[in-house]
Image: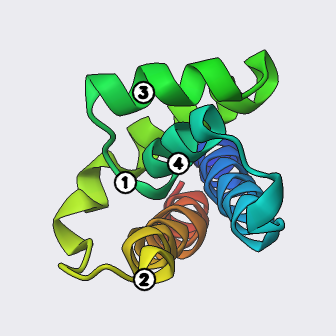
Amino acid sequence: MLAGPLRVVSVLATAVVALSFVLFAIDETSAASKRSAAETAGLRATRATDPSPDQERAREAVHSGVREAIDDANDVLLTPFAWAEPDTTNRWARRGVPAVLAIFVYGFVLAFLARYLEGVA
């Protein structure tokens, strides 16, 4: 009974985290010369697992409504993994480690739990 909804949550959560990371990667690989001061402030928030309110406002000013909705959902999904964010200046590691953990938990652990519940029922 819970297997179906759990599988849907697993797929959606994994898709949001993966899509948000892809968008982050696109931002990071864009030419630095094309970035304005406002966009740079918004990118600081994009790089954070759990952005501050000031970073969140800067990110909202730079991104479209759809992109901001994806980033907001990602913020919620990555919050339980913020503890794993390494204390480094490497923005790929700071964003990537929590994302990998989230994809593992949401994509594999929840999917495994859904299959297990399906077999028990």
Image quadrant assignment for residue 64: top right
Mark 2: amino acid: Ala
Q: Which element is circle 1 on?
A: loop
N-term-proximal mark, 1 vs 3 = 1
Answer yes or no: is residue 100 visible.
yes
Q: What distance separates the C-alpha of mark 1 from that of mark 2? A: 11 Å
Tell whether 41 sits left or right of 52: right
Please state the horizontal and vertical placement of residue 93, each as a whole percent of the image: 42, 82
- Classify mark 4: helix, strand or loop: helix
Q: Are marks 2 and 4 in contact (CB under 8 Å)?
A: no
Residue 46's label in the rendered image is 4
| Circle 3: residue type | Glu
Residue in view at x 45 percent, y 65 percent: 102
Residue tagged 1: 49
Q: Earlier in the sequence, mark 1 or mark 2?
A: 1
Relative to 16, residue 37 above or below: above
Residue 69, position in %: x, y? 66, 24
Spot occupied by residue 63 in the image (x, y as percentages of width and height)? 71, 28
**Residue 56 image label:** 3
Question: Which residue is depicted at the point 51% across and 69% down?
Answer: 116
Decide: few, some or many residues near mark 1? Use Cα within 10 Å; few <14, some 14-19, many ≥20: many
